[in-house]
Image (cartoon, grey):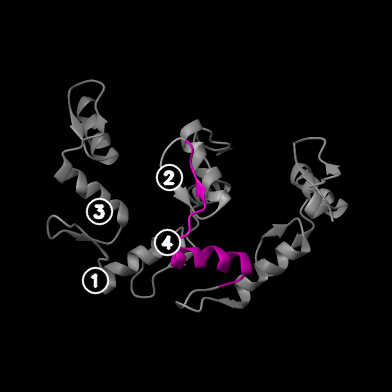
Amino acid sequence: MKIHTGEKPFSCNICKYQCIQKSHIQAHMKIHTGEKPFSCNICEYKFITKSDLQRHMKIHTGEKPFSCNICEYKCIEKRYLQKHMKIHTGEKPFSCNICEYKCITKGDLQRHVKIHTGEKPFSCNICEYKCIEKSKLQMHMKIHTGEKPFSCHICEYKCITKSDLQRHMKIHTGEKPFSCHICKYQCIQKSHLQSHMKIHTGEKPFSCHICEYKCITKSALQRHMKTHT
């Protein structure tokens, strides 16, 4: 009945977290203590709860019990499938009150809002890198460790993320899914198309603080700055 009444009798004495069940608060407190009693016997991952470990093990077994009835998408958890289905329905129930951004999940919105606030709660203990999401910090740390767990089966290319490998594979397949509606330009990544479109609009958002140079991309500005040094 507490679900219907909204009652959350258990609260954290460190942060504002509140919950219905004592077991939930006990699991939550491990976030603050850093305790991760459940560990994977295949890789080095450790978890707070047994259910988190059980979900993780599906990565190793390849088990994906939830599947989309429209496309070939399969996943480990029901909540991932529910999120995926909104892609087909076009449903975006969460919207930003600052800009026109709309998204599928509350988590996506919370991450987006940090763009406006400038909040970057996750920071690297080796360099000055800071970011919005824990997953991005974990990915960044692989730069320092040199870890590149994803490799191409055609060439010797290795990379940090699965998405980097998927982009790379398009080089071999010749696939260029993003195309300009003004000219014949086609490319592998959406970000490349967005950058290309600025050629047509004349937009040059990056400018030099020493001279009047302006350019389309951050990398072009970085190259230009070397001319001053």
Instruction: Please identify the residue farthest to the front as the structure is shown.
Output: 5
Marks 2/3: CA–CA distance: 20 Å
Q: Which residues are magenta?
A: 75-97
Q: Which residue is mark 3?
A: 193
- Mark closer to the chain start, 2 or 3: 2
Marked residue nearer the N-terminal end (4 or 1):
4
Q: CA distance from mark 1 to mark 3?
A: 16 Å
**Three-letter code for the amino acid on which mark 4 is drawn:** Ser
Tell me the distance, in whole angstroms, between the alpha carbons under discs 2 and 1: 32 Å
Residue drawn 51% across the image and 67% down it = 85
- Residue at image mark 4: 163
Residue 90 lies within the magenta run: yes
Q: Residue furthest top?
A: 210
Q: Amino acid at mark 1?
A: Gly
Q: Position of residue 31 (x, y in %)?
A: 74, 46
Q: In terms of depth relative to the viewer, which is nearer, 161 or 13?
A: 13
Q: Which residue is mark 2?
A: 101
Q: Mark 3 vs mark 4: which is more N-terminal?
A: 4
Which quarter of the rendering shows the C terminus? top left
Determine the secondary structure under disc 3. Answer: helix
| Residue 65 makes an appearance in the image | yes
Where is 187 relative to 42, above or below? above
The residue at which mark 1 appears reads as 174
Q: CA distance from mark 4 to mark 1?
A: 17 Å
Comparing labels 2 and 1, the label whose residue is closer to the camera: 2
Question: How much space separates mark 4 and mark 2, taking CA atoms?
Answer: 23 Å
Q: Tell me the SS state at disc 2.
A: loop
Q: Amino acid at mark 3?
A: Leu
Q: CA distance from mark 3 to mark 4?
A: 17 Å
Image x and y of residue 172, in percent:
28, 72
